[in-house]
Image (cartoon, grey):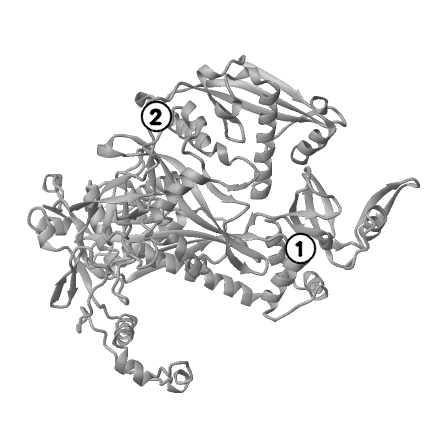
Amino acid sequence: MKITAVPAMSSSSTREVITLDDTDLSKDSFKAPESLNVATNMFPLVLTRMPIIQRIKVDTFTISSKDGTPQLNAPRVFNEALLNFHRLRQETLIAIFFKLRPHLVRGDFRDVIAYDSAKTLFVPQERYTGKEIEELTISKSFFEPETWKTMCEVLGNEEDKYLVRLTCDGLLSSKLSKMMVPANRLELIKCIETVISQKLNYSDFFHAGNLCFARCHNRLFDWDPHTEVRSGFCKSVVYTQGYNGIGQFMINTDIKLSVFHKSCPVLDLLAHEHKTFKKVDGTTSIAVQKDLRDNAEFSNLMEEALKKLCVTAKHLGKGTHLIEVIGISEEDAVNQSVTLRDISGERLVSIAEYYSKVYNIRLEYPNMRLLIGKLFNQEHFYPMEVLEVAPFQRKALKDRNCGIHNHPVIGMFMSPNGYIPSMERILKEQMKLKGNSLLSNFGIESRGWTAFYSKAKLLPCPQIKFGQEVKTLEIGSSEIQHSGMFDRPATIRQGAIISFNGVLSKREGGATVEKIMIEDQKTLEKVTRKLNVKCGGTNFVIDIPKSILSNGDGIQHKKLIENVQFIGLTKTRFTDVISGTCSIVAATFNVSDSTRLTGHSSEQTLNGPKIDVIDTIISRCLRKYEKHSTRLPSSIVIYRNVMNKNEFEIVKKEVNEIRNSFKHREDNYCPSLIVLAVNKVPQVRMVTPANENVLPGTYIEETTSFEHNEFILNSQVSSERISSPVTYTILANDEGWTKNEIAHMTWFNSFTNQTSYMPFPVVSVLHFADKLANRAMNIRKYAKAYEQ
């Protein structure tokens, strides 16, 4: 071991920065953990028979009947309802194209082409007989009038024409050598995902990214009078580590829940929102009309809610008339003018008069503010009373902890018993992969569509210290047994006891304070634990048991705990109707060699660069560590929350900026960084072969991404719901810790719940950083509302 003393920034003290020779750290600190088999929601694919795939670029154009100008068909919005409509439109055009030109492929086109509903079509090379470029203009001349009219309910104007152009765009191979190139691997993943999803690309299914919901069933329960909860599933193809690190393509699927809007009049939806806003039992359209005009906060809230929706107008009929709401006008139907063309010529009339003369609709609320909607890329004004919310649109829930997953009905879908068979049924029945001729022609096979059994490891539990008392938990434990001692009892100089007997005695069951004190020892213990922490004490600290170390304990302890600062860093964004989008960065951290989490910090920014905020927070973490421990940490372990793999590059850029910030320090301080991206959304779920939840401390590597250094850790177990493992991706590892060491320390640092004495589902520094960010967000929201 090598110790280097670095002068402090002030002349009155000296701090030490401890570094360790690499020769001391060449071996893993921990013994090999116990292994076991677990079933996962991953399904292996076999591509040994996959032929060379012809990739074809797809361009579709609408040729206007007015001026004959071709316009490229491309979605210009991110509204899910419109994107689903665009998907169906594109699928319809491709189906018509190959029905009119069947000679371009050998066999039925439905069994040999896979289309991503956008720009790319895949077909086995030996099945495609077309030229480099093939194109066809589709018009009503090809069909009977009634058939064409039905098609145009999806395509658009009956008088328009539609040009489809296919251009050969290279070949795709599944050879192992090609998989080492990331671009080839991603393109093959896209091809496989397109093939397995092809049977879902029709009007019976609603798509949102990799989520899929059946329209005709799977409704679970009403969320409120105008929304309902539906169950669906997600599906994706991943290239994993596989057995013994050999790359393996797998399908990942899981049950997903979403809240959907019901089809209802827009005025009914506004009335419900107004009732909630006013916190009253009932309201009227006149009251909604008044507050839309006079109450800026309510008006802004409704505009934000409606701008995310598509609506239909009862006077326009069915078909392609999905109107995208883009705002609420300041004008009403009386004051807003529009051009009326009739036998008398052109003249300006009010919206109210226009609807009366053209559609024979007499508006009941002409003084209601108008909606601004976009139809066929043109903006129009619409009275709210003629509009209905289009069906099958997901509602964004502002509160992530809204309780949707706690509803009793959800237990039937998310229990570990029967979970894997449910995933198998999704693949075989809903996705129709079993006996699928399209998969067969693409050479995509599976071993009976059965789940992947992975080799998992069961990590030992940390050692728990209550002052001089030390407890070693058994492997697989999920709770620390109560001890009569605290590691550091708080000093309370004054106290008061407030009795709630009068309130509690009115509750059903007659629960009183005296009854709780006598009979509910567990509640009393939790109150005592929380009180000790709130008053500045520490209930327990964790340590590494000597029995699990591979060789002694001195070096490993210095390497993994002493002079190591663990930081949880979370970024969250929210939009308030007053100041717009705001970003909050929050962190919690330890300030000494122990696992006491006594540091926290948060910053918020509207438009400034987020890295500046992160740099400020990291500096604050280091200053507090130095103040408490009289030295700076030699290693910093950062757990950074992410939502998906697309954020990895952002995190890597943050790591480089943090490293660069140390170069400007006058004391030459430059710690080692270990950075993990943490995705709390469960991707891979695990159950035992007996369809039971795995024990806490179970982690796997075989189903992780091939291109990233990852592990999946299950820290918490539910008695009724299937557990939700967390994915940890190692993006920086200056200290050269092994994955086993990082997994152990992550598991140990999940075991610091000072109140319930149970492990958190995620590493504790990130758990508390999330809570701090939510608290900062709520403070900002209520402060802004109070200022108004």
Q: SS class of the residue under badge 2? A: loop
Residue type at the position of mark 1? Val
Q: Nearer the viewer, residue 489 or 720?
A: 720
- Lower position in the chain sequence, tag 2 or tag 1: 2
Q: Is residue 494 above or below residue 76?
A: below
Q: SS class of the residue under badge 1? A: helix
Q: Which percent across, then down, holds residue 178?
A: 34, 22
Q: Which percent across, then down, holds residue 347?
A: 88, 44
How many labels were placed on the picture?
Answer: 2
Q: Quadrant of the C terminus?
A: bottom right
Does the image show residue 56?
Answer: yes
Q: Is residue 12 left or right of residue 386?
A: left
Which of the 4 image quarters holds residue 759?
bottom left
Pair 2/1: label in front: 2
Q: Is residue 91 above or below residue 328?
A: above
Which of the 4 image quarters holds residue 322?
top right
Q: Nearer the viewer, residue 752 or 400?
A: 400
Q: CA distance from mark 2 to mark 1?
A: 50 Å
Does the image show residue 576?
Answer: no
Q: Nearer the viewer, residue 585 or 503?
A: 503
Residue type at the position of mark 2? Leu
Q: Is residue 94 left or right of residue 123?
A: right
| Residue that numbered label 1 is attached to | 266
Q: Quadrant of the N terminus?
A: top left
Q: Is residue 740 left or right of residue 639?
A: left
Which of the 4 image quarters holds residue 172?
top left
| Residue that numbered label 2 is attached to | 47
Q: Nearer the viewer, residue 562 or 346?
A: 346
Q: Residue at (60%, 30%) from the top-left corner?
A: 92
